[in-house]
Amino acid sequence: MHRVDKYGGVINRRSLLQMLSCSAMVCGGVKHAMALDWPVELVKPAAISPLAPTGLFNNIALVGNRLIAAGERGRIMLSDDSGASWRQAPCPVSATLISCRFISEKIGWISGQMGVVLKTTDGGEGWTRVLDGFTAANAMVAEAKSDAAKPNVVATPASYVTAPTELQNAQFFVSSGAANPLLTILPISDTHVITFGAFGLALQSLDGGGTWQGIAANVPDPNGLHIYSALQASGAVIIVGEQGLIMRGSPGTVLSTIQSPFSGSLFGLLAIAPGTQLAFGLQGAVLLSPDDGRTWQSVTPATSSGILAGLVLKDQRIVLGDEGGNLLVSADGGHNFKLLPGTLPVTALAQAPDQSIILGTPIGLHRLPIQALARSA
C-alpha cells in the first residue's frame, strides 16, 4: 500500500513502519498458517546475549521500582537499580517489541512486530506469547463476517465503515500473513486489554489474553491509517496515528473522530495532568488537550525533528525526545519547551526511582542525571 505523503512525495507506508520500529485452526474459513510458514521471529526465542542492552529500545516502563525496556530482536531488559545495570529476561519471540504497558506491578503486556502480544504475570521475569499476526488476522476476518451478517451493521455516525470494506480490510491482513505490527497496547483492567496497529488493526481480549476479537467496527478508519498510540483518560480511550488521526470514546463503543490541528503523523500520547493530554509527532508537532481529548490546540514547535518519545517527570515537568537526539523540556504544562541538544535519536524515555532519566536509543539504554535537564533553562 502506498500513498502520497506531504513530507516526501510517494512513500511506502510499510517502510515508514519499519523505520519507526527500528528508529492449526480455521477461523471464518481462513486457514491458519502451518508452523513451517511462520516467520522465524515468531517461533525462535530471543537470543540471550551480553550485548542485549546495546540494541534499539522502543519503550521503557517503570513498574514499582523496576525498569522494563522492550526493543529489537525480542530483547526485554530489567533493572532493579535505577538503570545502573540491566539483565535480560527470556522472551519467546525474536520479533521487534514496540509498546510496553503494565496494569499492576505483576501484570503487563508488550506488543510489537509480527502482530505479537506478550503477557507477564510476575513483573516481567517471564513472558508468554498470547497473540500473533496470523491469529490477529483471523480474528479481524471473523469480526468482519459477523458484522456483514447483521442488518444495518454499525448504525452509528461511523456507518460509512460498511461491512464489505471491513471484510476487504480484514482479508488484506490475512494476505499479509504476520507482517503487520501492533504499535500500541492499552490495558483497561486485569482481564481487558486493547491493541492497535498498522493499517487500522484493532483487537481486544476480555479474558486476559486467552481469546481475541477484532474491533474494527469500533474504530471508523476507512483509510486504514496506522494507529501509533493509545491511552485511557477519565474512562475514555484516546488514540492517535497517521495523518493527524485522533479518536476518542468509551471502551467497547464506537470511537468518534476528533478534529486535529495537525495533518501529519502523531506518534505518542501523554497524560500530563488530570483532564489534560499531550500528543506529539512529525516535524516537532506538539498538541495539547485541556478536556480529556475532546479538543486540541497546537504548541509552537521547539524542534523540526520528529518527536518519538515522551515522559512526565515526578516534578511535573514534561520531557520529549526527538529523532535528532534533542530533549525538549517544559515546566509550564507543555505550552513552552526549551531545547537540550543531543546526538542519538531518543526512542524511549523513563524516570528511574533515583530520579535519573533513562533514554532508549538505537544503540542502547543510557542514564542521564536529572541535573542535566537544568541546562535546558
Image (cartoon, rainbow, N blue to C red):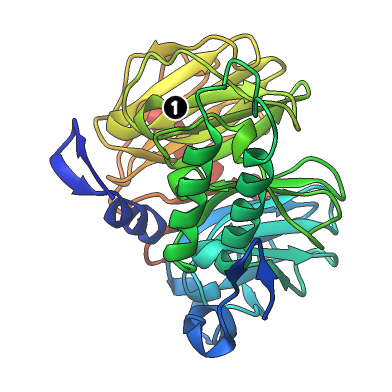
Q: Residue furthest bottom?
A: 36
Tell me where residue 290 sits by quadrant.
Answer: top right
Tell me where residue 182 sits by quadrant.
Answer: bottom right
Residue 57 position in % (x across, y down):
48, 61
Q: Is residue 185 visible?
A: no
Amino acid type of the residue tagged 1 in the rendering: Leu
User: Which image quadrant: the C terminus?
Assistant: top left
Q: In the rendered image of this protein, does residue 179 appear above or below residue 276?
A: below
The answer to whether 68 appears left or right of 268 in the picture is right
Q: Residue at x 47, y 80 (%)?
A: 39
Q: In the rendered image of this protein, does residue 236 appear above or below residue 242?
A: above
Find numbered disc 1 in the image and state the secondary structure of the residue it sits on: loop
The answer to whether 93 appears left or right of 234 in the picture is left
Q: Residue at x 85, y 59 (%)?
A: 106
Residue 192 position in % (x across, y down):
81, 46
Tell me where residue 337 sits by quadrant.
Answer: top left
Give 317 or 26, whichever is nearer the viewer. 26
Give 264 or 368, whichever is nearer the viewer. 264
Q: Which residue is mark 1?
A: 245
Q: Residue at x 31, y 28 (%)?
A: 264
Residue 5 position in % (x across, y down):
21, 35
Q: Residue at x 64, y 18 (%)?
A: 156
